[in-house]
Image: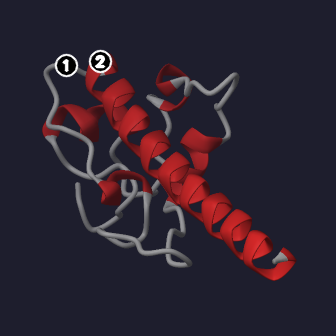
Amino acid sequence: MNKVRLGVVSLASAVALVAGSAVATMDLQKQFGTTYPGAPKAKCSTCHVKAMPKKGEADLNAYGKDLLATKKDGKYDFAKIEKLDSDKDGVSNIDEIKKGTNPGDPASK
């Protein structure tokens, strides 16, 4: 009985963790859209190395790392990194966001 109970608790914890991660991603995309209403929508690749990261492959690109460093109380401060050029391609993050290019991908200017 204890093994079954432990298995159920473990499964419930795993589901809650995955669901929490998905919600955080959607919340971040909504915050991006609210912060930049005239810009194209944020995609996973705005902050992540892979366009559709899977569990264990959610590495952040340079923009994602810079944005994560601004997180406080569950919110991100986009303004703190707007003037930066996170991907070192010669174009500021805010200019890339306005143009619809990826501030975390040096090949996207």
Residue 35 percent coordinates (x, y): 33, 18
- Farthest residue in the right direction? 2
On screen, residue 30 above or below 46: above
| Picture quarter with the C terminus | bottom left
Q: Are marks 1 and 2 in contact (CB under 8 Å)?
A: yes
The one nearer the camera, 24 or 60, is: 24
Q: Is residue 40 left or right of residue 6?
A: left
Residue 26: assigned label: none
On screen, residue 18 above or below 93: below
| Picture quarter with the N terminus | bottom right
Disc 1 marks which residue? 37
Secondary structure of the residue carrying numbered label 2:
helix
Cα gap from disc 1 to disc 2, whole angstroms = 5 Å
Q: Quadrant of residue 23?
A: top left
Display coloring: secondary structure
The residue under label 1 is which amino acid type? Pro
Q: Is residue 71 left or right of residue 51?
A: right
Disc 2 marks which residue? 34
The one nearer the camera, 57 or 70, is: 57
Residue 97 percent coordinates (x, y): 26, 37
The one nearer the camera, 19 or 11, is: 11
| Residue plotted at (46% across, 56% down) | 88
At label 1, counting other C-alpha atoms closer than 10 Å, the crowd grade (few under 14, some 14-19, many 20 or more) is few
Secondary structure of the residue carrying numbered label 1:
loop
Residue 82 percent coordinates (x, y): 44, 29
On screen, residue 103 above or below 67: below
| Residue plotted at (42% across, 35% down) | 28
Residue 27 percent coordinates (x, y): 41, 33
Q: How many marks?
A: 2
At label 2, counting other C-alpha atoms closer than 10 Å, the crowd grade (few under 14, some 14-19, many 20 or more) is few
Q: Quadrant of residue 56?
A: bottom right
